[in-house]
Image (tube, grey):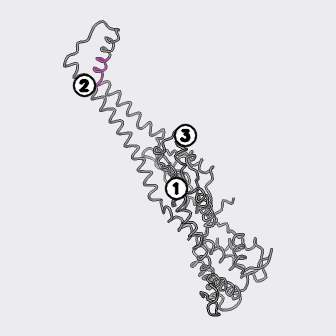
Amino acid sequence: MSDRERFIPQRASKLTKELSRLPWSGETDEAEQFRAFSRLISALYHYEFHEREQAAIDAWEQVTDDSEAAGLMVAELTDLLETANYVPVTMAELEHALTAESLIPLRLDVDVDDYDDLVIYRRGSRQESVQIPKWKGLKSGEQTITVDDRVVVYARVKPQSYFDESKIDPTKRNLQPGHVSLRQFRDVPRADIEMLLPSTRVGFRLVDSLLIGVPAIASGVAVLATKLLSTFGLIFLLLGAWLGIRDEQPEIDQATLIILLGGVITLGGFLIRQWTKLKNRRLEYLKTLTENLYFRTLGAGPGVLHTLLSSAEQQDVVEVLLAYRFLLDAPKGITADELDVAVEQWLAASGEADIDFEVDDAVSRLRRLGVVEGGTVLRALPLRQSLVLLDKRWDDLFLHGEVDGQTNTMGS
């Protein structure tokens, strides 16, 4: 698979204006004809994606209760993501994210075996330079990272039977057996992509353990030396007498009981303080993770499906418009490879990033629409002829038969 970006960051309306401004060699009204061509293409694809929307939502509503619907959901979602020019996050990339140092100061743990279905796709990667704080903000260093503009995560958790057999408490992994989630995120550092999974757990890094453990040990030694020495000495005397190691029985009076009680209170207070510090540090890390997810979340559930459908529709239309427009500039015909080069060069000259234009998909759609001819050498049908064909295709979508000897249609 190519590492180049396939996503074309253009909307059909803006792209139509830009392509219409390019020089025309034929009729004077070709620019207006091309705008009409764009409107028809957009309408036809909008109708097609409306049908896909109904199927996708129906599958989503049944996905938790029906394994067949779950399979259809994964197939439809994957196809939508591919059409919208997302690329899959491979297991190698996910494993690298799990082992690589995160940009947020956390250690994140996740077990991908908790899911029956796990689909992760990304789009729009870019390089950014960021300042990484070190030593509690006393020092920082610049680092170049990969950031994905959009990431979609679909996860279906395994049933309760799996957790029972594995002797795992799903609540400790923030999971609900059988639960299905679909979320879309923005501006996600590639190294932190694992934080998007529902079962991600926050753990302590080595530096965190040292920052908590070393002061706790130092405080424990100080408390032992200053406040608990007499208490432990008395406890050893009592244990020695009880075990028969010492013949002398220590006298237990009111002062002795006060010393013991004071020691117990001091020790209990010390342990509670350390536990509270540990708990607060964990809550602080959970807050950091929650904030990162909150500000990166774009949508969840059916809302993500609507967004993907709109994006996939736009990408299909944009690819068709680009391919058809540059075929019009070659009346004698060009090959698919030549078309690919022409479109990519124009996109680069227009200020877009290095985009890998999906020429095979675009040509396939043009053939399905019937506005291109030829085998190895491709030629676009003239605009007027293409408009007639597309207008008929639109009319035929709403053909309901004959009424009083006349065909009842919805015109364009």
Tag 1 residue: 180
Q: Earlier in the sequence, mark 1 or mark 3?
A: 3
Residue sitting farthest toward the top: 247
Q: What amino acid type should be assigned to the residue bearing mark 3?
A: Ser
The furthest residue to the bottom? 405
Q: CA distance from mark 1 to mark 3?
A: 20 Å
- Percent across and percent down for residue 185 are 51, 60
Q: Which mark is residue 261?
A: 2
Tag 1 or tag 2, which sits nearer the N-term? 1
Vertical comparison of 53 with 143: above or below: below
The answer to which image quadrant residue 341 occupies is bottom right
First in residue order: circle 3 vs circle 2 = 3
Position of residue 217 measured from the top left corner of the image (x, y, whole percent): 38, 30
Residue drawn at x 66%, y 76% is 320
Residue bounds of the magenta highlight: 226-235
Counting other residues with Cα less than 10 Å from the Cα at mark 2, is it few (<14), some (14-19), or many (20 or more)? few
The answer to whether residue 194 of the structure is visible from this angle is yes
Choose mark 3 or mark 2, whichever is in front: 3
The residue type indicated by label 2 comes to: Leu
In which quadrant will I find the C terminus?
Answer: bottom right
Please tell me which residue lies in front, 247 or 408: 408
Label placed on residue 93: none
Between the residue at mark 3 and the residue at mark 2, the CA separation in whole angstroms equals 45 Å
> Magenta stretch containing residue 232, yes or no?
yes
Q: Position of residue 343 (x, y in %)?
A: 68, 73
Disc 2 vs disc 1: Cβ atoms closer than 8 Å? Answer: no
Residue at x 59%, y 47% (from the top left corner): 95
Q: Position of residue 236 (x, y in %)?
A: 32, 16
Mark 1 closeness class: few <14, some 14–19, many ≥20 residues within 10 Å: many
Q: Is residue 21 visible?
A: no
